[in-house]
Amino acid sequence: MCSRSIVAPCVEVEAQYAEKALLVLRSLGYLLPNSKARSDKSRGVVRLPILEGLSARAVSVLGEHGIPATECVGEFEVGLRGLQYVDLLRGTLPEHVLRRLPRSYQLVGDVAIVHLPDDLLVYGSVIGEAIARVAKGVRVVYSSSITEGEFRVRRLVRLWGEGTGETVHVEYGIKMVVDVEKVYFNSTLSYEHWRVSEEVVDGERILDLFSGIGPYSLHIASKRRATCFAVDSNPWAALYLARSITLNKLLGRIVIVVSGVDDFLREVSSDRFSRVIVDLPHRSLEYLEKVMTVLSCGGYAHIYALGGEEPPVKDLEGGMSLVEVRRVLEYAPRKYIYGLKIMKKC
Ligand SMILES: C[S@@+](CC[C@H](N)C(=O)[O-])C[C@H]1O[C@@H](n2cnc3c(N)ncnc32)[C@H](O)[C@@H]1O
């Protein structure tokens, strides 16, 4: 297994107590995962690596078991499997920085994206390298801030690695070409893309509004003989969707439309689609009325909309029935993206 040495907090015990101390600390989950204890034969002691912030507690617990122990800090070999990137940075970055590092990051193909606070960007290259070491196959690591502009592209700062933001991301076996510097894409929504496609049946005609690189259309067309109209104003998104179509074996069809959604909807006649997906969370509800017009009777709209602790819509009137409301993603503290499924009644 791949390993490296890191500096970590530890407890030091006499060698005769080492085995019992290991048992106690392991049962409490205090030991640093994948790490090896270090013995110092000349002094007759063993050092046991402990998770950050737990060494004082470990010493007192061992005391309760009759094992004299002292706190220490030492260098240990740790296996990289199951290790968090933050663990690799212990001893390299100050404790107050480690505490503020995000625990998670997003993987898009061989690109990793972490959301670092601006004042931590000075540590970017070591943080990027640590992420690349634990996330196998990562080629480039970015820090992202908010998505911005009409195309909802993230502002990215490269922390570590080579090449561009272009990559092939695989979701449920479906290959998607994407350049994270040019288009919006959120890999944490993979389950949602799959979930909607599971509802579709052969023969449907689907309108995928604000389609981006087309994950909903690609999922649907890969498993159903359906036709998806994927509409987005970002021409790069259209280009990547076209390239993805060449990489996947599709049963259905995808019609790529590079257009503003308002312009497109003006051209569409009523009752045309069995299903409409609307994925521009801060504005989706503005399109509800028009979407109902283009839906056929009994058809469904899947609307992704921002809300607080309460969903943005609870009841609907006027020929619409709210079939399902789910929280899909935490967008900001106490702000969520909700998935609303609405049926057109006639
Ligand atoms: C939140 S992203 C949705 C991406 C996609 N549905 C997905 O699951 O990855 C919103 C998309 O809407 C597009 N967009 C924003 N305003 C638009 C408009 N007025 N007309 C067409 N597309 C627009 C952006 O380019 C972006 O790709």
Image (tube, helix red, strand yellow):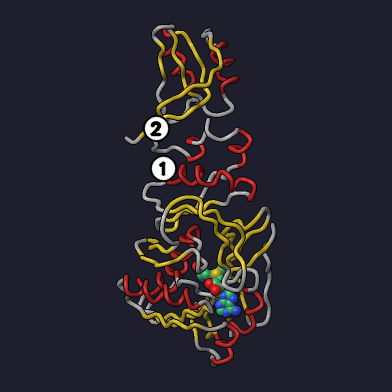
Q: Identify the residue shown where x is 59% and y is 71%.
A: 280
Whether residue 98 is situated above or below residue 69 in the rendered picture: below
The one of 317 and 289 positioned closer to us in this rendering: 289
The mark nearer the N terminus, 2 or 1, is 2
The one of 206 and 185 positioned closer to us in this rendering: 185
Q: Position of residue 178 (x, y in %)?
A: 43, 66
SS for dot 2 = strand
Give the class, few, some or many, for how many residues have Cα within 10 Å of label 1's Cα (few <14, many ≥20).
Answer: many
Whether residue 124 is situated above or below residue 287 in the rendered picture: above
In the image, taking residue 204 as reference, residue 98 lies left or right, namely right
Q: Quadrant of ligand 1?
A: bottom right
Q: Which residue is mark 2?
A: 4
Q: Position of residue 88 (x, y in %)?
A: 47, 36
The one of 43 and 126 positioned closer to us in this rendering: 126
Give the class, few, some or many, for how many residues have Cα within 10 Å of label 2's Cα (few <14, many ≥20).
Answer: few
Q: Position of residue 29 (x, y in %)?
A: 49, 27
Q: Identify the residue shown where x is 52% and y is 86%.
A: 296
Whether residue 193 is situated above or below residue 140 in the rendered picture: below
Q: Position of residue 89 (x, y in %)?
A: 51, 36
Please report contact status of discs 2 and 1: CB closer than 8 Å, yes or no: yes
Which amino acid, mark 2?
Arg
Q: Identify the residue shown where x is 36% and y is 65%.
A: 174
The answer to whether any part of residue 329 appears in the image is yes
Disc 2 and disc 1: Cα gap in Å?
Answer: 10 Å
Whether residue 38 is situated above or below residue 154 in the rendered picture: above
Q: Identify the residue shown where x is 56% and y is 43%.
A: 123
Which amino acid, mark 1?
Arg
Query: Residue 133: which disc?
Result: 1
